[in-house]
Image: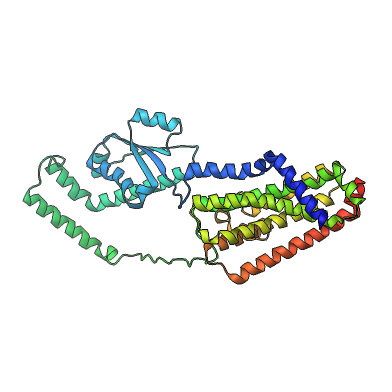
Amino acid sequence: MRLAWITFLNDMRRSARDPFSILLWAGIPFGVLILFTLAFGSGGDVKPQARVLLVDEDSSLLSGFLSGAFNQGELAELVDLQPVTREEGERRIAKGDGTALLIIPAGFSEAVLNDDPTTLRLITNPAQRILPGIVEGILKTLVDGTFYLQQVLGGPVREIMESTNDLADPPTNLLVSSVSVEINETIQRLEEYILPPAIELVVEMEEKDEEAPAFGFGGIYFQSMLFMFLLFGAQGISDGLWREREERTLSRIVSTPGRLSAFLLGKVLAGVTVLGGILAAALAAGTWLYDLPWATYPAALLWLVLVAGLLIALFSLVQLVATSRGGASLINNVIVFPMMMLGGSFFPPEGMPDWLAAIGRYTPNGYGLHILKMLQAGAPDAGTVLSAFAGFAAVTGIALWMASARLRSSFAKAAS
């Protein structure tokens, strides 16, 4: 094991002399994570909000009711309604500053009360895809509701507006009585349709999957970025085998009594130590920043270190099978990017179709991410976690044994 220790120390010194390569491995995923955090915040569920620019040229009670509907209940969280002039609204929507521009024309209230045609103008932002459709759907619902309300209460409301000079004068007792009778008669005619409702809404809550922990937006992306870093880091560390070959280090080792398996073990341990140190700091920062449970930190870190060892062993095997350094880099890239896509490193599994997320779970990083989520949920299934630890450790040992055999049979000999 003396050779393993010497190799470990040499690789640690080499890493200390070249910290920029390590920063490059971590820079891409954690840089993306920082941008997401700055854009969307560090915790909680992100709710999209549409910015609707409102031009109310009617300035009537009815147009106020229509625009006020956007500020009620959950719509107020979904829509940010900003009153503007027509000139300002058209200028801002042309520059993409807003989701949609809604123009309520003059005479809107009078047209609705008299059952005359009128047009609401909605100009959407072509640079946005989802939010403009949501705004359009909301507006269609409000327009339909206004139509049916007008059919039911249009007569009484029109009578009130005409008799009170658009509510400038108080209504008389006779007017209140007659309107009340008319509204009551209308409700009685519609009673068989609305009492009870012709359509009954039954809400069924889907049972929550206990194995799918609910994390905030930042926490979900943080977990995915950890595995993107592991893939980049493991790939970069495995490339060190070709550097040892090109620098004739392997040819000298072949002529010594030391075993090449010890040399390979030393390099893997050095790589795990480097990645483990970064993971320890990153996991601590993420646990604090994204409000993840600290009690799960040790188990999560141990699992990530084990995944790091497995990925380094697998990528080292790929390096040793390739016939050239360029070929090895090409093969690794062909492997890495599909793994990131399927395994939830580019897009978290929560945002992927169920069938695609299920396939991704069979990749090493995808299954590793799945177990990490279980661990950080705070109540993992002990049998599943222990099986995962044992399985990953076994696969790591097999990959190291195969890589060691390849190293002895041809890779090291070609260097001598």
- From what the image shows, is residue 282 above or below residue 191? above
Q: Which of 95 and 197 is in front in this view?
A: 95
Decide if residue 7 is in sight here.
Answer: yes
Q: Which of 220 and 54 is in front in this view?
A: 220
| Residue found 39% across the figure and 47% down from its top | 78
| Residue found 90% across the figure and 55% down from its top | 257
- From what the image shows, is residue 350 above or below residue 119? below
Q: In which quarter of the image is the N terminus?
A: bottom right
Colouring convention used in this rendered image of the protein:
rainbow
Q: Position of residue 304 (x, y in %)?
A: 64, 57
Relative placement, left or right, of 218 versus 108 is right
Q: Nearer the viewer, residue 250 or 370?
A: 250
Q: Where is residue 242 in the image (x, y as percent from the top left)?
A: 82, 45
Residue farthest to the bottom, as pictured: 383
| Total count of labels | 0
| Residue found 83% across the figure and 57% down from its top | 261
Relative placement, left or right, of 203 versus 290 is left
Q: Where is residue 298 in the image (x, y as percent from the top left)?
A: 58, 60
Quarter of image, res 310: bottom right
Decide if residue 363 is in sight here.
Answer: no
Relative placement, left or right, of 396 versus 344 is right
| Residue found 67% across the figure and 61% down from its top | 362
Q: Position of residue 161 (x, y in %)?
A: 16, 43
Residue farthest to the left, as pictured: 173
